[in-house]
Structure formats: structure tokens, C-alpha cells
Amino acid sequence: MNSFGARATLTAGGQNYEIYRLGVLDQEKLDRLPFSLKILLENLLRNEDGTTVTRDDIDAVLNWDPQATPSQEIAYRPARVLMQDFTGVPAVVDLAAMREAMKAMGGDPNRINPLQAAELVIDHSVQVDRFASPDALQFNTELEYMRNRERYQFLKWGQKAFDNFKVVPPETGIVHQVNIEYLARVVFQLEKDGVKQAYPDTLVGTDSHTTMVNGLGVLGWGVGGIEAEAAMLGQPISMLVPQVIGFKLTGRLPEGTTTTDLVLTVTEMLRHKGVVGKFVEFFGQGLSELALADRATLANMAPEFGSTCGMFPIDEETLSYLRLTGREESDIELVEAYAKEQGLFRTDATPDPVYTDTVELDISTVEPSLAGPKRPQDRVPLKDAKERFLAVVAQTAAAGGGTAVATSDGVSLHLGGGQQTLRNGSVVIAAITSCTNTSNPAVMMAAGLVAKKAVARGLQARPWVKTSLAPGSKVVTEYLSKSGLLEYLDMIGFNLVGYGCTTCIGNSGPLPQAVSDAIEEGDLTVASVLSGNRNFEGRVHPEVRTNYLASPPLVVAYALAGRMDMNMLTDSIGTDLEGEPVYLKDIWPTQAEVQEAIESTINSEMFRKTYADVFQGASRWASLEANDTELYEWEPDSTYIRLPPFFSEMAAEPAPIADIQGARALALLGDSITTDHISPAGVIKEDTPAGQWLLSEGVKKTDFNSYGSRRGNHEVMMRGTFANVRLRNQLAPGTEGGWTQHLPDGEQMPIYDAAMKYQAAGTPLVILGGKEYGSGSSRDWAAKGTGLLGVKAVLVESYERIHRSNLIGMGVIPLQFLAGESVEELGLTGREQFDITGLKGGEAKQVTVRATSDNGADPIEFQASVRIDTPQEVEYYKNGGILQYVLRQILKS
């Protein structure tokens, strides 16, 4: 509608572009806005249509009150959608299923098509089966293709069938690193009706660490796969104008520390601050001391902060990085011209915006750190790591799991050509992995230099440590190889195992059998150390109880030492060829050494060469055959890709929303239940419902693959929901894993089996929980599986943003206890029958919950908040989910 008269022309790089000038608005109000909100403001200005975006919406952002509780709903339209294969495969499966449903309802299947640019990077499927071997990359890649051929053929079909959909094949890199190194535009260009438009590159992604691109000045964050699918289909993202927390950085990192230490410190600070549902924006002169890769490392961890994003403004460092990574000079000129025209370009002289609140850190105070053993926000100063670990072992033993430190002499095993002893505290996995750190040359070069110095002193990784190097892009191996450091990493066991997330998402592969047997025999509390961003229970490896996040050079150091129960700063990590002790300080590089390695090695040609034919893939990808049809040819006996039941017998109009009567609790859970606890992830065990189903389908145990690889098959995924080996359901006390008690008979059984028994009886289900329910990765199957099990409502004390939204997207109502109330305060046992009344078609702000015990006690009645936060979410809930809503809208249009 352009009611503000904002449409204008910008000339850059010899081209004219249509833009929507923020400068037509009140300049004084603009100057006080955080950069992230200016991007939202431009988005509304450009998409004003009088219906989904009105003049009042634009005024609401322009007149943003930093202290106000978010209440203004806006319709945000990202420029593109980014996916990885674990979350992307089910998204494409859903689109294929929507085409089937559209045809069944008399519509045109080809109308189900991405309207926004959608890009998928295959990076979650490679597993570390072979390690510490020169052929590890080739071996693991061959296994990856063998296990995932059907999934990959399906994605190739999708690339042919859908417009605006591109796939980056395996053996390329991790989605977020590929995004900052190649896919991100910073300023998006689109030709429409013969006119070239320029506007901020914005996105949503199906991985929570989409925020990594915030380091490049690109606004983006993680959403559930169902939200992403709706965005691809042209639906705006319904959101509340957020509060924005400013994080002021001053100073520079001291010698002996890394960006990882800074990241873990900031994560701890912001979790303590409480930024869930808020934007975080970094400011201050300390930004000028941070390389772009450092900023990206910080932004990557926004989900660990709990915030929606972790934004950095565009500045000279942004332009330098675009040049380094081989972007076209004309595009860089457009980025600079556009950002300066729109007030989106920062210098040290730029006045600080106004924020809801601020946090400040002098970077020079950062100290070497780890995070763990269960959460990324639990920072452990390196000097305290030994004592903290021993306390964890003692607590684990006291709780009935693991062997007490004082009574454990360890377990003897034959490994590496000799007898070894595995004890509490042994490090059994040391992995340089994950987008967080492998995108950062400073920490990767530091790891290589530690390896070089270690080799010079005759040190090796301990025989019981599973070592691996899984870079985020081929550029990393290019510069490590050119610098001569890759050969030293190889020499101590950190051979290249693949280009993918690997250990950080549970694709760590099996431990050597002798190590696995020793852990079980001694009931040992062993450790992993990884350069990742996630260390939730049961995520890295089911046999490893404690998991620590660390910088790549520290990962190498712990592999050399082989144990957590030591003071890395004062104890020796090994003995050299002369029989002398070697300490961390002896092999730790200086910042000058790291910088010299970077400057003498990395150049833009590496990036141009790596990404020249990025969508074509290697020979294995090119040789895959895929059908060229508008509808996918489903194989009824497939164990990887199956037509999901989300749209079966779907009517053109939704049925009225009814109150929930006679529900039973499927699980009663505590605080900090993550989507890793809920969603199927990692290995599939033979004795689980998912494993038993695969066996019944004729799949051998050796071919089970991982839950992530089978995300396109609802039969496997619903059986793995709430099946995490570390889940503790209070309805099945004394157990770990996916167990519950079927009521009212009290029989203990797997959660899936109980859910099916309830479904057969027509009994609706609820989940009860505590604080921070659904924190962690944006796993759509955490919501999809919950819905397919028959859960109609989740009632907890608080939610993380993405999972709450995803529950609504699957037709599950998120309810929240009123302040001061909880399962414990109300005296609930979870063994009651629950009636939830007053839903009012999903429009109610509060409902009445009545819990009636089977023993004849007086019912417990209380009010609960309905966490359907926006009118658009009400529509999704009324339709039984977001995709059902979109499908009906397309059918009507």
C-alpha cells in the first residue's frame, strides 16, 4: 500500500534497486530503535497490505516501548527458509503429503509449492563409525549413503518437484557455517515484475542455531518445521514485537583464552538474566575487537541463552568477511550502500540504541572455561573442573546411578595394544565438532597448534578416547592443510571423519566394544568433551553420563590427558619422550601464533573454490536417481519415508473445538525438560518400541540407523517420543527412559504402548511438567510425536518459545500454571482424571482444570493460563494445526 510513501530508488554497484526507505519515518524515533527492530520495521513497511500488515502495525514498532510487556502482534515475512536434513526431510514429507491431500480434496497439487526461497543443507546424517584412521572420511561417507539412500533420493525428488527449493548435498558442511560462508546475502535481491528490489536478508530456520547468521547482521532464528513449512507456503510468521536486551561488550580477550570461553561466559550471564522470548543485541566498542567468526560463534549460542536471536549490526567487519568469503564485489557494494541508507550500519561513533535492559561484560575478565555436565549454561571455570566433576560423580552414586569415587578402582581392558584401566572420570569421547566452533579459524588453528606442540613432545591421545574432527565446511580442511596443521591433528588421532554435526547431535557412533563393556561392568561415570553447543542428558552418547562443552584446543588437551578428574591448569597431561611431565601451558599457543597461522593461510580463493558448484555435489550425490513427478510415489513398506496421517480424512471445514474430558496423564515430568528428552534422537535400541517395530518390518539391528535419519517415518518417530534414556517420569518412579504407568490399572509399560492403549479406549491424554518445558533444539517431532500419541494438552509452569508454538502447530493446547502454582503446590499426583473446561474454541485466556482422584478424595480444581498468545495461533489451533490451516486457506483461495 505504501501509505508512508517509503518506496524509493537506491543506486549501488551500477544497478538501480527499489527499496522502502526507513528515512521517511520519524528520525528521532528511528535512531533509538535497536538494529533488529529496524529490520522488522522495514519488513512491515514493505509488506503493508492493509490486512495482514496495517499502518497501525508499523506505527507500533516505530513507537516501540522498550519496557512494555509484549502485546502487539505483527505479521513477519522472512525472505527465505533454511533447513537441515533431520528437520528438512519431515518438512518435505509434509509438503508431499499436502499435495496428496490437496488432490484428494479436489484442488491442484502444484499449488503446494514454496513461495519463499527454501534451502536445505544435508549435514545431520553422517555418523562417526570409523575414527583415528586415514580412511575415516571415506568409510563414514559410504556408510552414510548406504543408510540414507532412500532419504537422499526423496530430497532429490523434492528438488525437482518444488520450485524455489535447493539442496546442498552431503560432504559439504554444516548448515549454519554454509549459511554464513555462502548462502547468506545480508541484503536480499529479487526481481519482481521487471523491477529489482533490495531489502534485508531475513530468514527462519528449522534448526535453533539458525541464529548463527545474526553475527553477519542477518536477522533470523529457529522455528519448528511446521512453522517453517507455513512460511515457505507464504504464511507470515505471527509474533509479538519483542523486548530487546542490549549486551555491551568492552575490552578484548586475554592471553590463554578463546572465543569459546567468551561464549560460555555470555551464555551463563544471559541465562541468569532471563531472556526467553526476547531479542538480544550486542553493542559497545568491544564489537570492534571481535572478528566476524567470533560474532557468529556468539550468535550461534542464542538458543542456549534462551533468547530468540543474538544480533550484531552490519559494519566494516561484515564487509571484510563478505570479501574474504568470495562474495561478488557488486553485492558487497549493495550491502554497504543499503545498510548506510537505512541506518543499519554501525561504527564506533554510532549512538547506542535504547534497550529494554542491558548487560555488560569486560571481555578481558573472561577465563578458560567448560560447560557441563548436562547443560550449556552451566559454565565451569577450568580451574574448578576437577572438583566439580568429582562432586557430580558422588551425587550420581548417591542417587543410585554410577560407582562412588572412593570405591571405584576402575575396570581393566585390553586396548591399543596393551592393558588399560577405565575409571570414573575417563574421557571416552573428544570431538571437534559442531557449527559453533568449527566456523571459527582462531579456535581451529589453535587446536592444530596444540596438536603440533603435542606431537613435538611425543604425546598421543589416550587409547580409550574416541577422537574425531568434523569441520563445518571444506574450507576448514583447506586452511588446516595449507597451514600444515592437519597432519599433526591426524598424528594424534583427530582424523577427518566427515562434514557434519556428528557428536553434537548424538551421531557419535558406537564406542569401541571394550570401552562400552568396561563402562557397563563398572557402572562408570565417564565423560565426553566436545566443541559443540549442546550437552543435554542422553544426547551425545547413551553410555556417557557427563558431557562438557569446550574450545577445540581444550578438546585436544583432554584427549591427550584422557581424564576429567584432573586440574588441567596445574596437573601434567602426559609425559614427553624424555620422561618429563608436559603441562597445558607447554603446548598452548599464543594469540600471536594463532593470528600468524590465519593470516598466512586463509584467502578468498578457498571459499570461491569450495562453493563453486555447491548444489551439484560429489559423484555419489550425482549418481542418485530420483523420479520427476508432481506427486511422490510412496512405498508402503518403506521404513524411512511414509505418508503421514496428519491430513487423513481431513474435511474442508474444521470441527468445533470441544472441552477435554476424562483425560489421563501420560507423563509427570520435572523442570528443564528439553526437546531432546521429548523428541526421538540418537541411536535406536533393540528393546524399545521403535526397535521392535523395525525388527517386525524386517530391518536388521545393524541397519537401524538413528532416529534422526528416520524422521520421515511417523511409525518410528511416535514410538521414540518421550523415549530418551535419561527421561525421568514420576508416574514410573525408579525408572529412567520412556516408561509410564497405565491408569487406572497401574501397569508399568513403555510410554508408546500406554498411549496406544489409551487411544484404543478413547481416552485423551495430558502431559504435566515444571519450568522451562521444551527448551533446546527446535525439534518439530517433539510436538508431532506428542500429538500423534494422543496428547491434547500440556500443563507446565513455563515454556521455551519454539516448543510452545510447535504444540499449537500440532493442535495441542499449551496450558500454564498460574504464578505460585505447580504440580507440587496443588498436590497433584498425576494419577487423577483431568477435565479441562472453558476453552471457548481456543479463544479463552484461562481455563478451569478439575483433577479427580480414583480414590474418592475431593477433586482439585484450579485455573490455568492458555498460552495461545496471538489471534493467528488461535486460528491454527481451531484448525487442528498450522498445516491444516494453510491447506484450507489455499483450497479456498
Image (spheres, helix red, strand yellow):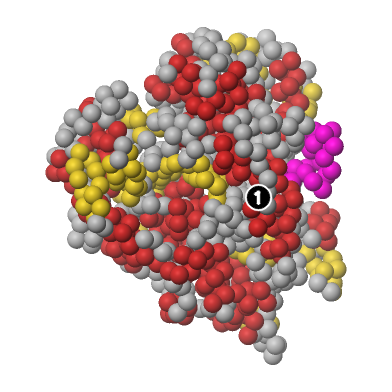
Q: Is residue 685 magenta?
A: yes
Q: Is residue 294 magenta?
A: no
Callout 1 secondary element: loop
Image coordinates for residue 75, horizontal then vertical, percent: 35, 30
Residue 288 in view: yes
- Looking at the rendered image, the quarter that the N terminus falls into is top left
Residue sitting at x 57%, y 40%: 160
884 and 523: which one is in front? Answer: 884
- Looking at the rendered image, the quarter that the C terminus falls into is top left
Residue sitting at x 65%, y 50%: 125
Residue 247 in view: no
360 and 541: which one is in front? Answer: 541
Image coordinates for residue 255, horizontal then vertical, percent: 43, 75
The secondary structure making up most of the magenta span is loop
In the displayed image of the protein, which residue is found farthest to the bottom?
578
Q: Identify the magenta region.
A: 679-706
Q: Is residue 560 above or below residue 345?
A: below
333 and 884: which one is in front? Answer: 333
Residue matched to label 1: 125
Total numbered circles = 1
Residue sitting at x 33%, y 42%: 191
Image coordinates for residue 320, horizontal then vertical, percent: 34, 65
Quadrant of the rendered image containing residue 634: top right
Amino acid carrying label 1: it is Ser
Dot 1 surroundings within 10 Å: few (below 14), some, or many (20 or more)? many
Q: Is residue 707 above or below residue 100?
A: below
Quadrant of the rendered image containing residue 642: top right
Image coordinates for residue 492, horizontal then vertical, percent: 67, 75
Residue 398 relative to residue 777: left or right: right
